[in-house]
Amino acid sequence: MHTQLDVNGRAYALDHDPRTTLLDALRDHIGLYGTKKGCDHGQCGACTVLVNGRRINSCLTLAAMHDGDEITTVEGLGEPGALAPLQQAFVDCDGYQCGYCTPGQIMSATGMLEEAKAGDPSHVSASLSGDVALDDSEIAERMSGNLCRCSAYPFIRQAIHSVEGKE
Amino acid sequence: MSVATPLPHDSAPLHVTGRARYVDDIPAPAGTLHLAFGLSPIARGRIKAMDLAAVRAAPGVVRVLTREDLPNACDTSPSAHDEPLLAEGEVFYAGQAVFLVIATSHLAARKAARLGKVEYEEMEPLLSYDETLAAGAEFEAEPRVWQKGDAGAAIAAAPRRLTGRIEIGGQEHFYLEGQAALAIPDDGGAMHVVTSTQHPTEIQHKVADALGLPMAMVRSECRRMGGGFGGKESQGNALAVACAVAAKLTGRACKMRYDRDDDMVITGKRHDFRIDYDVGYDDGGRIAGIDFTQVTRGGWSMDLTLPVADRAMLHADNAYHLPACRITSHRLRTNMCSATAYRGFGGPQGVLGIERMMDEIAHVLGIDPVEVRRVNYYADCAGGGGGGGPSAPRSAAPSPPERYLEQDRSPGSGHAMSGALAGAGKRFGAEHSPVARPVEPQTTPYGMEVKDFLLNGMTAKLLADCDYAGRRAAIRAWNERSPILKRGIGFSPVKFGISFTLTHLNQAGALVHVYQDGSIHLNHGGTEMGQGLFQKVAQVAAARFGVDVAQVRITATDTAKVPNTSATAASSGTDLNGMAAMAACDAIRERMAECLAGLHQAKPEAVVFEGGEVRVGEAAMSFAQAATLCYENRVSLSATGFYRTPDLAWDRIRGQGRPFFYFAHGCAVTEVAIDTLTGENRILRADILHDVGASLNPAIDRGQIEGGYVQGAGWLTTEELVWDDKGRLRTHAPSTYKIPACSDRPPVFNVELWDGENPEATIYRSKAVGEPPFMLGISAFLALSDACAACGPHYPALDAPATAERVLAAVKRARG
């Protein structure tokens, strides 16, 4: 079947099996390998991308469901030499070790910062309405869907916090 | 200077932009085929019949192989040649590869593999400790027994005695990047294999064996892994061999990666252990003698079980000077996946055995667990690495750096040290007042003298810094007012031996080229799995040439560049490869110095490599100009370097010798809370003081310490492996196997590096850091035990992992 995807501002016309996940479409059809396959179960977060600005596990959704959608992958945020602030913060804070979960962490954090800005509450928020103060426990809770086996969590949180503070 | 600097990871800009390539991200040659194994669903049985017609007929399938189609057993074992690539008439665990599908896509191969019809004659699998012991299914003819003194007599004569048992679960590596390999046929029957592996040489060796080729015909390469933790030391062999065999048969590139569930079912994990202790001690908690019996389940093949179980014995003393000790170790052959290397390599299990015992002694005596530990510590040693007690100022000084520079640097000569090492030398030692050294040498249960112990001073500092005493009192008071929630605090030290216990593995090689434009190409035998090894070694190379680390090009580990490498394991990567790289750099630097000195009528010793410049007397030029000049004067600008760890001697049968070059130390205090109605628990705070010698890169070392602690705490709390009574692993995905998430990291987490230098002549006097901090997670386990103990008068005897269920059971035991 045919699906039109807008990935990082570029249009792609895919001819694919209806069961192809968005993750496999990005990696195998488009050749963007930055989005990683960690578990293929929607449980590790390594495949996180933005769909129309919202974060999503790309292994748990079919490419066919995103006809015409705007997809942002880690390659679309910035590149070496012209990093996005969050990417730079991960470099500055050593927010990784092996790096395999990093694209997912950064995409997830990008989406998460927008959610918080929009006032979306989390499990640990004191109130369901009003402004969200992104303290350490809020960041930890909102990032708990992105596993890092090297457990670079302290530095990941620090990186996210540093960007959140600046904005 | 580039060493002792918190530089970011070598691939930092690539990681954050998704441009760092892992095996599955490398664009494969056109026509690449994909592989999948057909797996045994049962734990033990004979294969009666195999009908693979449906597999062969499935869309996209190119070939299907069984044992009969292979040129030989295609053994994938790292040790005993007991792991045929595909089952030979019998299966020994649920998840064993029975046939291999070669197809045009990953998905086609996996789908087809499900269509195999294999009939088995099922047999009763050996699973539990007791039934396997009773069946006598052990990897060695006899259990290993090591002794120091007469433990039986010492225990009998002691005023007090207790016996106990702890069961310790295994651990799934859960490297985020699953196992993966790509084999590309090369000219003349040669094979090029790209693998996610900690041990490229073993991959080369196993592929060469399977293909009947000399090792020189196989090239094995690894740029980076998405995590290893020991799980890629031997467990990648099967994929690499399968790809190579299939590539040879089809003439096409072949690629294989395990999906997460397959990965968890097929590959080995940390060894689980059951440890019995029988200890004699006095009213002050001082130990007179211990008898440990360690039993571990090694799974269906030997893999690395013997050295892992040896290391559990080697760490049975942890940080304590035992007058008499007997350690018995049984290594069981069970019908489960073959347990393998995992960060700490048996050490953590051995350490947990004695830490649990210390905890129980303290409970019986009603004294602070830290005090029981302190009275049994080895004594701190003079020259053991500087630093001071809780109030001692951080300062520099005793052991003379000049002597070390002149005598201990085997490959480099004494000259031209001016740039890199002079600064490092200034940081040597400290004016500290260590606990007086005993007259008799203090030895471990395996007869090694402990000469660099630091934990008395470190413990004093950590306890003061985190207000251990005040918090313990506050927690006791809080618990008295809190009937449902209970808090607990735990302390644990670690003394970890650094070196491979198979002595010949303690060697490394490096290859360095300086190009005529002054850029530097660095290669060595170590592999990068996120631990920052490549950056640390690049920092060493940059320091030797006095240039910025950006001038050093780090390249993939490649058996065609540096041969006969050891696995990047045993925390030894930086120690070994850093020294080898230094030797290579120094060889080139000496040649350059000699050439430039000749041109300027100076002595080679007067040539200084510093700040991106090379100075000869008054003359100064950039490193690039120096390289050009040397090239034009026909100087060889390429060299290999080699290093072997000195002074090691080890007899594993007798359990005697000096298996380790030195010890790395650390200690931690963790505070937790439990819910006594549900067993739910969480870590509230952790404080760590860890010894990395003179850190090559404090940022990377800190990451290793924090990550090690969290992973260690995960092992002992939420990470539970469950096999059913048929021997099937039921926890084979992150949905059922819980590793720590971002929200599980302690909300208060203080990590400090102990300021000192390694008294042994390691690379810039640093210490290994990969494994030792893993054991600091034990303090979280002990804190949970402490919280359970607050519920009643009895010892809670908590087993690991301390899941909510086990915490609840321990609370019940405490209440009686």
Image (cartoon, coloured by chain):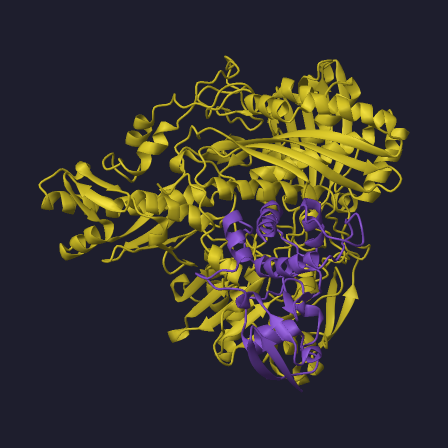
Image x and y of residue B659, in percent: 50, 34
Residue that appears at 38% across and 49% down:
B538
Image x and y of residue B326, in percent: 65, 27
Relative to residue B283, is residue B80 depicted above or below?
below
Q: Nearer the viewer, residue A122 or B197?
A: A122
> Image quadrant for the C terminus of chain B?
top right
Query: Residue lying farthest right?
Result: B816
Residue B344 in view, yes or no: no
Chain B: give its colour: yellow
Residue B805 in view, yes or no: yes
> Image quadrant for the N terminus of chain B?
top left
Residue that appears at 62% across and 37% down:
B775
Query: Residue lying farthest front?
Result: A130
Which one of the lettered chains is coloured purple? A
Residue that appears at 33% across and 43% down:
B543
Q: Nearer the viewer, residue B85 or A30?
A: A30
